[in-house]
Image (cartoon, rainbow, N blue to C red):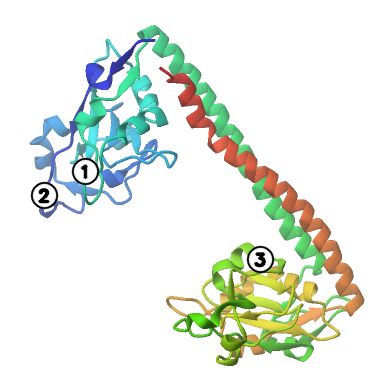
Amino acid sequence: MRPAKIGDVAKVQSGFAFKSTTFKTSGIRLLRNTNILPKRVYWDDAAFLDEAEYQRYPDYQIKDGDVLISLDRPIINSGFKVARVTKDDLPALLVQRVGRFVIDPLKVLPEYLYAFVQSNSFIGKVTGHDQSLGVPHISPTQVEAVELPLPSITRQEQMVASINAQLVEAELASIGIKAQLHELQALSGAIYRQAYASILPIATPHKLPEPPTGWRWRKLSHVARLESGHTPSRLRPDWWGGDISWLSLTEIRALDGRWVEETQLRTNREGIANSAARVLPRGTVCLSRTASVGFVAIMGKPMATSQDFANWVCGECLDPDFLMHALIRSRASLREMAMGATHKTIYMPALESFHICAPDIYEQRRIAKDLKSQLAEIETLRVALTQCAQDISALPQRILASAFEI
């Protein structure tokens, strides 16, 4: 398969620099750089010119089947902005920073060139040029200088058919994996509903449903001591990096639903002594109450938290795992309690009003144990499916790489 420069088979025509002062709110759409997404044209934020202006620029009127390329610098493995025009995109005018391939049909098929410019083989060659200051761009000349494999038109047709068939299979596999992940999430919800007898076990006084047989509602602060946290001064580096783990919002998403043995940040005795932070005992249940509202973890050893957490030290009649999972089961309704325009927060009066519905301590422990076992099985499946999804997401570039090896 002989190589050729793109410029030997297709020229890249850049769009026109229309003045934004001439833009209208309706009329003929302007195809700008922001309208090009990987493999599709996106029109939700379109700008317009009137019909008379459209007729003045016949050289920049896009056509059905045109192959378009963003002239912003592409990034390997992040999806390159290249698309094909369909009849639904017409009429429209080509704007600066978007390129259109003017193709010699006797040398290259549009479908073949379209597949090639989506490949990392092409992207890697384009990104080999020095970046300019500001927003990094590429020029039509840089695109035209890239070499591509150039078999006969008949062979190109065969390759395009094979590539498209493989990409369809990869897309179907991706859809299948996503469906399985969605089913796992639904299964997790069903397990929680069954464990908590189809009620939300954490609620405020005006939303307490009838308790299941053998369960009863209690004020959470009557069965667990509510504590807040605090942050030792960041201006005192000598108060940080000690031997006291300090839980913060930066890691709570990753720790959700777990016992925490270590934290990324640590303070020391001086930091605790000179702040309102408190070292809380093992088994304390920590709920993020601001910004990342609703994530929950349990202290696996004595540690402190930032003020972004509500912390419950469970009494003898409340199991920490049961409380953690009760908070997770009620997460959606808890997030509705959060207030604030910028950072949503559940404030202390709301936290102090929390009630919990629970059976006796022995039944709580049984429920928590069963949940742990069932959720562990789901997590194992989720990790395996997530890895499959990552592998499948890499397939399109592998298919293109195989096709366009020179």
Q: In this rendering, which labeled residue sits more in front, label 3 or label 1?
A: 3
SS type, badge 2:
loop
Q: In this rendering, which labeled residue sits more in front, label 1 or label 2?
A: 2
Q: Which residue is mark 2?
A: 19
Q: Nearer the viewer, residue 291 or 93?
A: 291
Q: Residues within 10 Å of mark 3 (few under 14, many from 20)?
A: some
Kindly indicate the quadrant of the structure image that contains residue 386. Answer: top right
Q: Which residue is mark 3?
A: 256
Give the residue type at disc 3.
Answer: Asp
Please give the name of the residue rendered at 74% of the width and 82% of the height, measured from the top-left corner: 281
Q: Is residue 96 above or below residue 108?
A: below
Q: Residues within 10 Å of mark 1 (few under 14, many from 20)?
A: many
CA distance separating discs 1 and 2: 11 Å
Q: Nearer the viewer, residue 78 or 63?
A: 78
Residue 344 drawn at (x, y percent): 50, 76
CA distance separating discs 2 and 3: 51 Å
In the rendered image, the quadrant that contains the C terminus is: top left
- Is 130 positioned to the left or the right of 379 in the image? left
Do we see residue 404 in this rendering? Answer: yes
In the rendered image, the quadrant that contains the N terminus is: top left
- Of callouts 2 and 3, the N-terminal one: 2
Residue 77 drawn at (x, y percent): 44, 39
Do we see residue 91 in this rendering? Answer: no
Residue 387 drawn at (x, y percent): 64, 42
Q: Which mark is residue 154?
A: none
Q: Which residue is mark 1?
A: 30
- Is 89 positioned to the left or the right of 259 in the image? left
Please give the name of the residue rendered at 54% of the width and 77% of the height, measured from the top-left corner: 290
Q: In this rendering, which labeled residue sits more in front, label 2 or label 3?
A: 3
